[in-house]
Image (spheres, rainbow, N blue to C red):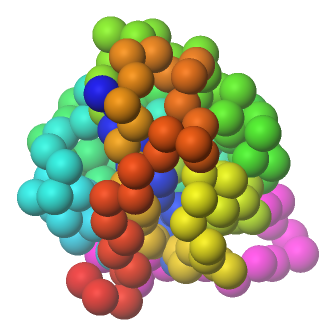
Protein backbone atom coordinates (compact mmCIF):
# COMPACT_ATOMS: atom_id res chain seq x y z
CA UNK A 1 0.00 0.00 0.00
CA UNK A 2 1.33 3.43 -0.97
CA UNK A 3 0.14 6.76 0.45
CA UNK A 4 0.66 10.03 -1.41
CA UNK A 5 0.07 13.39 0.26
CA UNK A 6 0.09 16.35 -2.09
CA UNK A 7 0.81 19.74 -0.49
CA UNK A 8 0.87 23.02 -2.36
CA UNK A 9 3.38 25.53 -1.02
CA UNK A 10 2.06 28.10 1.43
CA UNK A 11 0.99 31.63 0.60
CA UNK A 12 4.03 33.42 -0.82
CA UNK A 13 5.06 37.04 -0.80
CA UNK A 14 3.74 39.05 -3.73
CA UNK A 15 5.52 38.87 -7.05
CA UNK A 16 8.05 41.65 -7.59
CA UNK A 17 9.85 42.58 -10.78
CA UNK A 18 13.18 42.71 -8.96
CA UNK A 19 12.83 39.19 -7.53
CA UNK A 20 12.88 35.97 -9.50
CA UNK A 21 9.77 33.82 -8.93
CA UNK A 22 12.00 30.95 -7.78
CA UNK A 23 13.26 33.09 -4.89
CA UNK A 24 9.90 34.23 -3.48
CA UNK A 25 9.58 33.45 0.25
CA UNK A 26 6.52 32.52 2.26
CA UNK A 27 4.32 35.25 3.67
CA UNK A 28 3.54 35.13 7.40
CA UNK A 29 0.23 33.36 6.72
CA UNK A 30 2.03 30.80 4.54
CA UNK A 31 4.49 30.00 7.33
CA UNK A 32 1.71 29.51 9.89
CA UNK A 33 -0.35 27.36 7.52
CA UNK A 34 2.64 25.14 6.68
CA UNK A 35 3.32 24.42 10.35
CA UNK A 36 -0.36 23.78 11.07
CA UNK A 37 -0.72 21.57 7.99
CA UNK A 38 2.24 19.46 9.11
CA UNK A 39 0.48 18.82 12.41
CA UNK A 40 -2.79 18.02 10.62
CA UNK A 41 -1.07 15.58 8.25
CA UNK A 42 0.56 13.89 11.24
CA UNK A 43 -2.84 13.41 12.89
CA UNK A 44 -4.49 12.10 9.72
CA UNK A 45 -1.78 10.01 8.08
CA UNK A 46 1.21 9.87 10.42
CA UNK A 47 4.77 10.80 9.57
CA UNK A 48 5.62 10.12 5.91
CA UNK A 49 8.59 7.97 4.97
CA UNK A 50 9.71 10.63 2.49
CA UNK A 51 9.22 14.35 1.95
CA UNK A 52 9.96 15.36 -1.62
CA UNK A 53 9.89 19.06 -2.52
CA UNK A 54 10.50 21.46 -5.34
CA UNK A 55 13.67 23.40 -4.61
CA UNK A 56 12.08 26.85 -4.98
CA UNK A 57 12.42 28.95 -1.84
CA UNK A 58 8.68 28.93 -0.95
CA UNK A 59 8.38 25.15 -1.34
CA UNK A 60 11.56 24.57 0.68
CA UNK A 61 10.14 26.70 3.49
CA UNK A 62 6.78 24.93 3.30
CA UNK A 63 8.40 21.48 3.38
CA UNK A 64 10.64 22.40 6.31
CA UNK A 65 7.82 23.92 8.38
CA UNK A 66 5.51 20.98 7.65
CA UNK A 67 8.35 18.60 8.57
CA UNK A 68 8.59 20.26 11.98
CA UNK A 69 4.89 19.57 12.58
CA UNK A 70 5.43 15.98 11.44
CA UNK A 71 8.57 15.39 13.55
CA UNK A 72 10.33 14.58 10.28
CA UNK A 73 14.07 15.37 10.12
CA UNK A 74 14.55 18.47 7.97
CA UNK A 75 17.93 17.14 6.85
CA UNK A 76 16.17 14.18 5.17
CA UNK A 77 13.90 16.25 2.90
CA UNK A 78 14.75 15.63 -0.75
CA UNK A 79 14.66 18.62 -3.10
CA UNK A 80 14.13 18.13 -6.82
CA UNK A 81 14.43 20.90 -9.40
CA UNK A 82 12.18 18.88 -11.73
CA UNK A 83 9.25 19.71 -9.43
CA UNK A 84 9.50 23.48 -9.98
CA UNK A 85 6.43 24.66 -11.95
CA UNK A 86 6.24 21.33 -13.73
CA UNK A 87 3.28 19.60 -15.42
CA UNK A 88 1.56 16.64 -13.80
CA UNK A 89 3.10 14.05 -16.11
CA UNK A 90 6.60 15.06 -14.91
CA UNK A 91 5.43 14.89 -11.28
CA UNK A 92 4.08 11.39 -12.00
CA UNK A 93 7.45 10.44 -13.52
CA UNK A 94 9.27 11.68 -10.40
CA UNK A 95 6.86 9.71 -8.18
CA UNK A 96 7.34 6.55 -10.25
CA UNK A 97 11.06 6.66 -9.44
CA UNK A 98 10.58 6.62 -5.65
CA UNK A 99 12.17 3.57 -4.06
CA UNK A 100 9.54 0.95 -3.28
CA UNK A 101 10.72 0.69 0.33
CA UNK A 102 9.02 4.09 0.80
CA UNK A 103 5.36 3.51 1.65
CA UNK A 104 4.25 7.11 2.20
CA UNK A 105 5.39 10.29 0.49
CA UNK A 106 4.57 13.94 1.05
CA UNK A 107 5.22 15.93 -2.12
CA UNK A 108 5.42 19.73 -1.89
CA UNK A 109 5.06 21.67 -5.11
CA UNK A 110 3.26 24.17 -7.27
CA UNK A 111 0.16 24.72 -9.34
CA UNK A 112 -1.00 24.06 -11.95
CA UNK A 113 0.89 20.75 -11.84
CA UNK A 114 -0.41 19.64 -8.44
CA UNK A 115 -4.05 20.41 -9.24
CA UNK A 116 -3.66 18.62 -12.57
CA UNK A 117 -2.16 15.60 -10.77
CA UNK A 118 -5.11 15.52 -8.36
CA UNK A 119 -7.48 15.60 -11.34
CA UNK A 120 -5.43 12.89 -13.07
CA UNK A 121 -5.95 10.74 -9.96
CA UNK A 122 -9.72 11.10 -10.21
CA UNK A 123 -10.70 13.98 -7.93
CA UNK A 124 -12.32 16.91 -9.70
CA UNK A 125 -10.71 20.07 -8.36
CA UNK A 126 -10.46 23.45 -10.06
CA UNK A 127 -7.63 24.74 -7.89
CA UNK A 128 -5.66 23.44 -4.92
CA UNK A 129 -5.27 26.60 -2.81
CA UNK A 130 -1.90 27.55 -1.34
CA UNK A 131 -1.07 25.69 1.84
CA UNK A 132 -3.70 22.99 1.19
CA UNK A 133 -3.24 19.22 1.01
CA UNK A 134 -4.87 16.15 -0.51
CA UNK A 135 -4.20 12.50 0.34
CA UNK A 136 -4.55 9.39 -1.82
CA UNK A 137 -3.77 5.75 -1.17
CA UNK A 138 -2.97 3.05 -3.71
CA UNK A 139 -3.25 -0.69 -3.26
CA UNK A 140 0.15 -1.30 -4.85
CA UNK A 141 3.61 -2.16 -3.61
CA UNK A 142 5.36 -0.13 -6.30
CA UNK A 143 5.30 3.62 -7.02
CA UNK A 144 5.59 3.04 -10.75
CA UNK A 145 2.15 1.40 -10.75
CA UNK A 146 0.14 4.21 -9.16
CA UNK A 147 -2.66 5.43 -11.40
CA UNK A 148 -6.13 6.94 -11.37
CA UNK A 149 -7.64 3.48 -11.76
CA UNK A 150 -6.26 2.42 -8.39
CA UNK A 151 -6.26 5.76 -6.58
CA UNK A 152 -8.35 5.95 -3.44
CA UNK A 153 -9.15 9.46 -2.27
CA UNK A 154 -8.57 9.70 1.49
CA UNK A 155 -8.96 13.36 2.48
CA UNK A 156 -8.54 17.00 1.55
CA UNK A 157 -7.71 19.85 3.91
CA UNK A 158 -7.79 23.48 2.85
CA UNK A 159 -5.41 25.86 4.59
CA UNK A 160 -8.29 28.18 5.49
CA UNK A 161 -9.84 25.34 7.53
CA UNK A 162 -6.84 25.06 9.85
- Work out which quarter of the rendered image holds the C terminus and state it: bottom left
Q: Residue furthest right?
A: 17
Residue at 77%, 78% in the rendered image: 15
> Residue 116 is drawn in which quadrant?
bottom right
Q: Main secondary structure of the magenta part?
A: loop
- Residue 103, can we see it? yes
The percent coordinates of residue 48 (x first, y second) are: 26, 36
Q: Nearer the viewer, residue 41 or 58?
A: 41
Expressed as whole percent of the image width and height from the top left, the position of residue 11 reads: 53, 77
In this image, 155 relative to 6: left or right? left
Picture layout, residue 75 above or below residue 151: above
Q: Is residue 62 visible?
A: no
What is the x, y in percent for residue 47?
A: 18, 40
Q: Is residue 138 above or below residue 15?
A: above
Q: Nearer the viewer, residue 19 or 121?
A: 121
User: Residue extending furthest front?
Assistant: 149
Q: Which residues are magenta?
A: 13-32
For residue 87, side relative to residue 108 (left or right): right
Q: Position of residue 127 (x, y in %)?
A: 64, 78
Q: Quadrant of the N terminus?
A: top left
* Residue beneath the point at 32% across and 10% down: 101
Q: Measuring 59% from the left and 52% from the top, which residue is drawn there? A: 121
Q: Say which residue appears at 70% left-offset and 27% top-offset.
A: 93
Tell me, yes or no, whether the highlighted magenta stretch contains residue 152.
no
Amino acid sequence: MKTLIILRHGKAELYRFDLDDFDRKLADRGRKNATDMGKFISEMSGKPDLILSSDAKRTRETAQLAAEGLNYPISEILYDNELYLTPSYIISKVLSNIDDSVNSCLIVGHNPGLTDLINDLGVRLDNLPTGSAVCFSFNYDSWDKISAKKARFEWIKLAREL
